[in-house]
Amino acid sequence: MCLDAGRITMPDLNTPLSVSEIDFRIQSVNNGKYATVLAYKDARVDMNRLDAVYGVDGWQKEYREINGRLYCRVGIYSDKLKQWVWKEDVGTESNTEKEKGQASDAFKRACFNLGIGREL
């Protein structure tokens, strides 16, 4: 929810994320002078946005393996079409938690395809 000129509004999937939903990390430092900073979101941000827009029963996710790669499909129920609409993407392993990182990355990428956090 957002407070807009004294009234509460509900976000849609494409509403830009607030600063409190974004994390930052230094990717690299160039000769000690310049830092490359990455802005990113975690999977909870996507889950919270999907819950806020569609409710806990209006979306779902599924994982499947294709050629050794983990894919996540996120489905949104369309009242207009009277069916589930799916977006899918593949994840990459993280350096710290291989399987968990891959699942989280696939989910976040699928949510990006739905419009969440595209401004990042």
Image: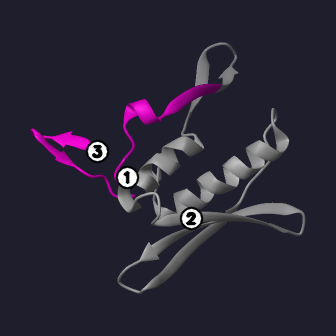
Q: CA distance from mark 3 to mark 1?
A: 8 Å
Q: Position of residue 53 (x, y in %)?
A: 36, 58
Q: Is residue 23 above or below residue 101?
A: above
Q: Position of residue 110 (x, y in %)?
A: 60, 61
| Residue situated in front as seen by the camera: 54 or 11 | 54
As drawn, the residue found furthest toward the front would be 57
Mark 2 and 3 residues: CB-CB less than 8 Å, in contact? no
* Secondary element at image label 2: strand
Q: Was residue 4 drawn as part of the magenta stretch in this picture?
A: yes
Q: Please name the amino acid that badge 3 sits on.
A: Met
* Secondary element at image label 1: helix
Q: Please name the amino acid that badge 1 sits on.
A: Ala
Q: CA distance from mark 2 to mark 1?
A: 14 Å
Between circles 2 and 3, the one closer to the viewer is: 2
Q: Position of residue 104 (x, y in %)?
A: 68, 48
| Residue situated in front as seen by the camera: 114 or 64 | 64
- The residue drawn where x is 90% and y is 63% is 68
Residue 26: mark in rendering: none
**What segment is highlighted magenta in the picture?**
1-26
- The residue drawn where x is 48% and y is 34% is 22
Quadrant position of the N terminus in the picture: top left
Residue 60: mark in rendering: 2
Which residue is under mark 1?
52
Residue 1: mark in rendering: 3
Of the numbered discs 2 and 3, the one sitting upstream in the chain is 3
* Secondary element at image label 3: loop
Q: Please name the amino acid that badge 2 sits on.
A: Gln
Q: Was residue 117 drawn as part of the magenta stretch in this picture?
A: no
* Label 2 Cα crowd, 10 Å radius (few <14 / some 14-19 / many 20+): some
